[in-house]
Amino acid sequence: MCGIAGYIGGNKEMGRAFAEKAKTLLLHRGPDDSGIFSNEYVTLLHRRLSILDLSESGHQPMTSSCGRYTIVFNGEIYNHLELRKRYLSGHNFRGHSDTETIIELFRLMQHKMLAEMVGMWAIIIWDNESKRAFISRDRYGQKPIYIRHIDNSWQLASEVKPLIRENENLTADPTAVVEYLAVGNYGHLGAHTFFRDIKEFPQGHYTWLSGNETSFTPTPYWTLPDIKESDKRQFDAQAKKELHDCIVEGVLSQTLADVPVGITLSGGVDSSVVAGILSTYYDKEIHIFTAQAPASKFDESRYVDDVIFLNKKGNFIVHKNNLDELSIKEELTKYIRIQEEPFGDPSIMAHGFLMKMAADAHIKVILNGQGADEVFFGYNNLAQAILLKQFSSMQFGTFYKNLSKMSLGKMYMLRTLLMSLMPSVETNLRTKSRIKRREILNEQLLEGVDNNLITLYNYNNPYDVWKESIYGAQIPHLVHYDDRNGMSSSIEGRMPFLDHRIAECVATIQSGAFLKYGLRKFLLRESCKQYLPSSVYNRTDKIGFYTPLLNALYKDADWVKTKLQSQPILKKECENILLKKLYGKTLTVSEGLQIWRSISVAIWQAEFGIQ
């Protein structure tokens, strides 16, 4: 896990200056080592957080044995030792880093190596013969690459800050800002970021790029598998075992490290599965980091305790934090600097607290349960797609039983029935609702919004909803905050459920197995039942690392008011209503989130000099 940057252009001095600036700005991503490769066409920077092969043989930038290719790489390739045996058995390696595996594999296979790699990555490889750079990101985009064409050059970096010129007044992307303010969505607009002129290289793609090009078209090397329902298999004993083994392999492969490993544990199904697998098969100490809001109705401490009790092998070392201590006045600005964009809610700050706890305990690698909800249809909107599939297949008894046992209230049931009976009407209502929620915003913010960038997926097709979750609504911002929070504390975050082999296994199983007896992610619960206490297995609620948003707003009300009024984001009458409710402590959660998003944008504008 590291920080990388690249300059592709014809000005060697400019390239060197860019690399030196990035070297300073990306220090937190790689405090253990750094290196720069430079010639008249390219400059590559690497900042190293030493995880594998802590010796000098893991130093980057690294040049291939043939001398033609030079790489900077951020991430981990969990199967790189197997790739050495399969394709490079006759090669004399200098060390045991995955970086050396990649550059030698690229020497033999070029882009075809991507299909063989299991892991997460952001890669820039310079070909000194063709004078071009090869660029790639992993399948889910866990590792970032931002790119900007500026000053007749391409500039790339793991974070946005190195791509901003000194004293530059940047312009916001209006669609990204309005979508976030109105509906809370972000990271769902493909290459578009909150910054108009800075793009994100797409996940699951690669490209070749030279300094004299002004545009590029990335090529996909992997997409979510789309299998017809008629070709899928039942969730029988064999499928259950195959999925179990795939998940175990996904978790254990990500313990690959020459440093201690820890996990975050919320008490939900996903992180509890990771904890149980590690307790069963991993023979080293496991540091567990958890944060709760004690005595609140959202306190999950009892589930955490149940998981620890069930897996009482003795190799858990538990670290706890109190979320009631959260102060947005003290922390929000810092986390917006870290995230480089406004974000969803204070739970992302809670995750940051956990990363700080891990850093204080001298842990460099943290596994978590993130990604399981997206892969296994765990969220409400994903579960709705399964319900509609059951309804359209005339499994009315199963449909109603699941819907009633999920206990989500009458409005959810009515909306699901409306989707079932009149899908086009529901989609039209959803579109109108999305536009209506912009009415509270200052009208100037709406100028330049491109509604063509926004896709409303079809709930009647589970694959479309799954694809939207992976590429749009959920995974992009999830991997973003995990990367930023971890790297801000020089910690590598790993997500076992984003092993692509798990998605490829899940795609072969009939959709009914995802939701049964009112239990979301039923096939995950069943295949990994042995690792879950019954209290966690039977949970139907979803909390995560709950953070008391309204209490935090009330606690710092005067500061919140100042930030809310610092930028003309909301219409004045709407702003006044929210402030009255803030001081009267009568905010609803949705109103609290509206205030949160508004002050987040205001702080982001101020911190990054946004016009």
Image: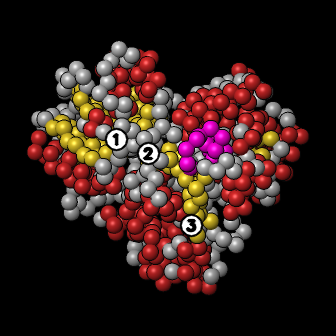
Q: Residues within 10 Å of mark 1 (few under 14, many from 20)?
A: some
Q: Dot 2: what SS?
A: loop
Q: Which quadrant of the figure has residue 336?
A: bottom left
From the image, give the main secondary structure of the stretch colored magenta: helix
Quadrant containing the N terminus is top left
Q: Residue at x 69, y 71 (%)?
A: 296
Residue topped by disc 2:
259
Could you tell me which secondary element the residue under label 3 belongs to?
strand
The amino acid at mark 1 is: Leu
For residue 394, what is the image quadrant? top right
The residue nearer to you, when weighing 223 against 50, is 50
Above or below residue 295? Residue 268 is above
Give the residue at mark 1.
54
278 magenta-colored:
yes
**Point 72% across, 61% down: residue:** 302
Q: Is residue 272 visible?
A: no
SS of the residue under disc 1: loop
Instruction: Tell me whether circle 3 and circle 2 mark residues in contact (CB < 8 Å).
Output: no
Q: Residue at x 44, y 33 (%)?
A: 77
Rounded to the nearest whole Å, what is the CA distance between mark 1 and mark 3? 31 Å
Q: Earlier in the sequence, mark 1 or mark 3?
A: 1
Q: Give the mark, 2 or 1, whose residue is nearer the N terminus.
A: 1
Circles 2, 1 touching at the beta carbon (< 8 Å): yes
Point out which mark residue 170 bears.
none
